[in-house]
Structures are given as structure tokens and as C-alpha cells.
Image: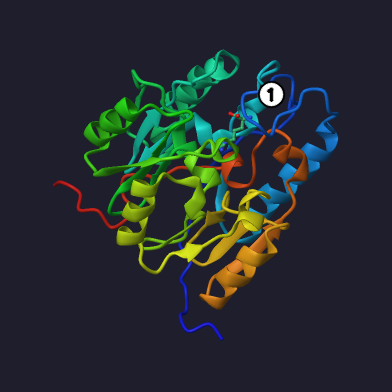
Amino acid sequence: MPTTVRTATHRHYLMCRPTYFTVSYAINPWMHPENAVDTELAIAQWERLRRTYLDLGHEVSLIEPVPGLPDMVFAANGAVVVDGLAFGSRFRYLERMPEATRYLEWFRTHGVEHGVRDAYLPLAVAEGEGDLLTTPDRILAGTGFRTDPAAHRELAEYVDRPVVTLHLVDPRFYHLDTALSVLDEHNVAYYPEAFAPESRQVLADLYPDAVLADEADAVVLGLNAVSDGRNVVLPVQATGLAGRLAERGYQPVPVDLSELRKSGGGPKCCTLEIRPSHVEGRVENG
Ligand code: ARG
């Protein structure tokens, strides 16, 4: 029986329809350009995800997809927004580099109406919420495959919040959001084996009550989940993790994104959270 009652808080997400989704290059071990991709199915699965957020009462904004940028559907990589400040992206691989301007421009054009007061282009490689996961107390920042530790320092300075560097060691879990999920203000779920020993220790110290995932959960990208504090939208295949979340009072909300997984992405990859300056209970000036 769940012992804790969890509270959902209203969220605002940015998403990008997978109109031009395909797997035409390989920049992570999930991607096999020789295998067929069903773009129509990817769109239908993505539509279900968007619908799921709307049904949960959240707001979803859309950015226009661009032909020739098949991974642009993974909006999480476009930026990380902390307290109304959009820290943009600088992609590791050539194939995705043009996405950065699209997302930065979106925040420069539409940011103000959504409570985003500035947008910044980092100097070091940074792949948005793929590697930079926000909590009220700190930002958990992954490195090892994509985001450069220099970007962790840039982010800490830009948003004035502590950034904790975590080292990823398993190429299947190349972005932090494939190995760790922020569940609420104080807790996370993660797959310990995806992290270097010293980072595992850091996580164990920071989150003694974390929900631990096993390899079966991780290999279906179960940790690529989106939580509103109560409802946790996660891949339907991650049944073990769903059970453990339910035991802890969270409400698992399964979705099937099997087609997008062919590119190494799940629900969280498709979802960039817009956090305006007035949320998270931070004290404002004036
Ligand atoms: N094919 C994309 C890449 O390798 C997938 C990105 C998934 N996004 C994420 N936030 N993990 O960059």
C-alpha cells in the first residue's frame, strides 16, 4: 500500500512533432540506419504522449519541425529552462547542430509570453535537459558522452544554482535522462550501473530514498520518464519500475514510444519543461 500521497503540480512543456523523424545516422548505440522506421507510427505515438500531458492538465507548446533534422523531436535536448532562464544547446555531433538555433530562436521569440526572460547560447557542448536535470535545490548534470563539464560550470554561473556533475559510463545511457529521472522536488529514480562509482556514491548520499531501477527497466528507457510530482509518464515496457513507483505512491502513466526508441529516445527526450521565473517557490526581487 502506498504510504505517501503525492501532489502533482502544473507543468508547461515544449514539444516538436516528429514529422520528419527517421534514423538516417547513428550517434548512439540504439540507432541503426539500416532498419526501417515507421514515421506515421512515430507521429501517432507522439500524439498520444501529447494527449497524455493535456489529459493530466498540463500545457503543451509546439516548435515547428524542420526537414532534414530527424532528431528535432527530442525537444529535451533543445535547452534547459531554470527560473525563466533558457540555457540553450550546443550539440556534440554535426548532424544535430542546426537544431540549437531553432530552439534558441523559439525562446527568443516566444519566451517572454511564457515567462522566460532570457536565452543563452553556451560556449561548451551542452545538450539541454538530456544531460541537465533541474531540481529546486540543485541541477544534476551528466557528462561522459555528450555534455562537456565546462558547460556544467557555465550553467551554474548563468542560473546561479548549484550544479552536481555525474559521470555516465554505459554508452546505452548516453544522456543523463536515460539513466535518471527527477520524480519530485526531493527525489529521483535512477539506474546505478549507468554511473561511475564516485557518482553512484554522490547519488546515494543526496537521495537515500531514491527509487532504484534495474537493467530490465533501463534497457527499455524506463528512466526516460516525465513526472509532475505524482503522475510519472514512462515507457509501457518498464513494468518493473512502474510497480516500484506505485509502491512509493506515484502514479505510473505508461505510454508506448517504441518507434522513437529506435533513435534512443523516450517520453522525456520528447519533452522540454518550461519553468517560468515565478514557479519553484523562489524569492523574487522587489
Ligand atoms: N538520437 C538522439 C541522439 O542521439 C536521441 C536523443 C534523445 N534525447 C534525450 N534527451 N535523451 O542525440
Instruction: Count numbered badges in the picture.
Output: 1
Task: Please tell me in which quarter of the rendered image ligand 1 is found.
Answer: top right
Q: Residues within 10 Å of mark 1 (few under 14, many from 20)?
A: many
Which residue is at the front of the view, 80 or 196? 196
Query: Does any portion of residue 200 appear in the rendered image?
Result: yes
Q: Tag 1, which secondary structure? A: helix
What x and y, as percent, mark residue 171?
Answer: 56, 35
Which quadrant would residue 99 be assigned to in this image? Answer: top right
Q: Is mark 1 within 8 Å of ligand 1?
A: no
What x and y, as percent, mark residue 222?
Answer: 62, 54
What x and y, as percent, mark residue 240?
Answer: 65, 66
The residue positioned 35% from the left and 22% from the top of the image is: 122
Q: Quadrant of the N terminus?
A: bottom right
The residue positioned 65% from the left and 32% from the top of the image is: 29
- Amino acid at pointer 1: Pro
Q: Name, please, the residue furthest toward the front.
A: 197
The residue positioned 57% from the left and 61% from the top of the image is: 232
Please tell me whether residue 209 is drawn above or below residue 109 in the rendered image: below
Which quadrant would residue 82 be assigned to in this image? Answer: top left
Query: Does any portion of residue 180 appear in the rendered image?
Result: no
Looking at the image, residue 264 sits to the left or right of residue 163; the answer is right
**Scheme by which the image is coloured:** rainbow
Which quadrant would residue 141 be assigned to in this image? Answer: top left
What x and y, as percent, mark residue 95?
Answer: 60, 15
Looking at the image, residue 220 sits to the left or right of residue 280; the answer is right
The residue positioned 34% from the left and 54% from the top of the image is: 201
Return the residue at label 1. 70
Looking at the image, residue 83 sits to the left or right of residue 143; the answer is left
